[in-house]
Amino acid sequence: MYEKLGKAAQYIQSIKTSKPKIGIVLGSGLGVFVDQIEDKTIIAYNDIPHFKKTTVEGHEGRLILGKVKGVEVVVLQGRLHAYEGLPMDEVVFPIRLLAILGINILILTNAAGGVNLNYRPGDLVLIADHINLTGKNPLIGPNNNQMGPRFPDMSHAYHPELLAIMKSVSQSLGNNIHEGIYAGVLGPTYETPAEIKMIRTLGGDMVGMSTVAECIAANHLGLKVCGVSCITNMGSGILDQKLNHDDIKHEAQKAMNHFTSLLNLSIEKFGKL
């Protein structure tokens, strides 16, 4: 794994030499944020050694190097999911690659279903913590001590300082933003009404099929992590309607003004840490 990461990083650095401070993963329908990136260099996932191609609509499959508010960033426009049939080490390969490239802060974004009855489609929610309901963990197997410890601490999986900064930024923009617990499931089916009730009972506020494995891998690597979910639909059974991916992408696009402003100003502040 470490050799594969080295080859992938070497290829990227051969195209553009940079040492990004912040990595950003863009979830379903949130890829419009790339328009905010200056001095862009775009590399297709297909061209990066040992990098898998994303197969999900709304995930473009591009790694982008550039700057936001003068801060060097590397952006993953589209992510990999275990439900695509990939082993967990391949799902988190991109996160580990970003660490090799030099980031120390990781911003995870996703489209999520609302479980908390106070949420509405179009709301943004800062991830305060998560519940892993996937039955999987990217650290299963022999530990690579070059990456991190055998038993990484997850007490502050989402860094409190970064969370506070993002909350303050949202308030300064005059936008309402929630804090909540993200429940990660395997997918690819949407949850049943009974499962949504279970997740609410367990303390989950929103649910999705990503992010958790990436957060675990990032904490293993010693990165500071923060996350934001865009509520694109209410969980199954809350409203009398069927769920489909096109509606989710549409709702994500409606939240883009708040989303891009939040990320822009947060990145500017993160760059000073």
Image (spheres, helix red, strand yellow):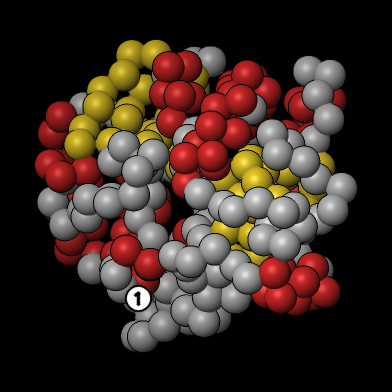
Instruction: Identify whether 41 is placed above or below 190.
Output: above
How many marks the image carries: the answer is 1
- Crowd rating for badge 1 (residues with CA inside 10 Å; few <14, some 14–19, many 20+): few
**Residue sitting at the far bottom:** 141
Task: Answer left or right for 239 relative to 46.
Answer: right
Q: Furthest-right residue in view?
A: 118
**How far from the left and from the top, in percent, is residue 152?**
56, 74
Determine whether 62 is above or below 182 in the image.
above
Q: Residue at x 32, y 64 (%)?
A: 84
Task: Please name the amino acid that badge 1 sits on.
Answer: Asn
Q: Say which residue appears at 76% left-offset and 26% top-offset.
A: 169
Query: In this rendering, would 54 be left or right of 161?
Result: left
For residue 107, which quarter of the picture?
top right
Q: Is residue 187 depicted above or below 179 in this figure?
A: below
Figure check: 219 above or below 59: below
Q: Position of residue 124 (x, y in %)?
A: 71, 37
In this view of the protein, which residue sits in the foreground, 170 or 122?
Answer: 122
Q: Is residue 68 left or right of residue 237?
A: left
**Does residue 156 appear in the picture of this structure?**
no
Q: Look at mark 1 in the image and give the residue it sits on.
A: 144
Where's the N terminus, which quadrant? bottom left
Q: What residue lies at 62% left-to-right and 42% top-to-bottom? A: 232
Of the pair 13 and 55, the residue shown nearer to us? 55
Residue sitting nearer the eye, 232 or 14 = 232
Q: Position of residue 98 (x, y in %)?
A: 37, 47
- Secondary structure of the residue carrying tag 1 is loop
Question: Could one spot residue 249 in this view of the protein?
Answer: yes
Estimate the x, y position of residue 259 in percent, counting from the top left.
62, 27
Q: Residue at x 34, y 49 (%)?
A: 56
Extreme residue toward the front, this view = 240
201 to the left or right of 237: right
Q: Quadrant of the C terminus?
A: top right
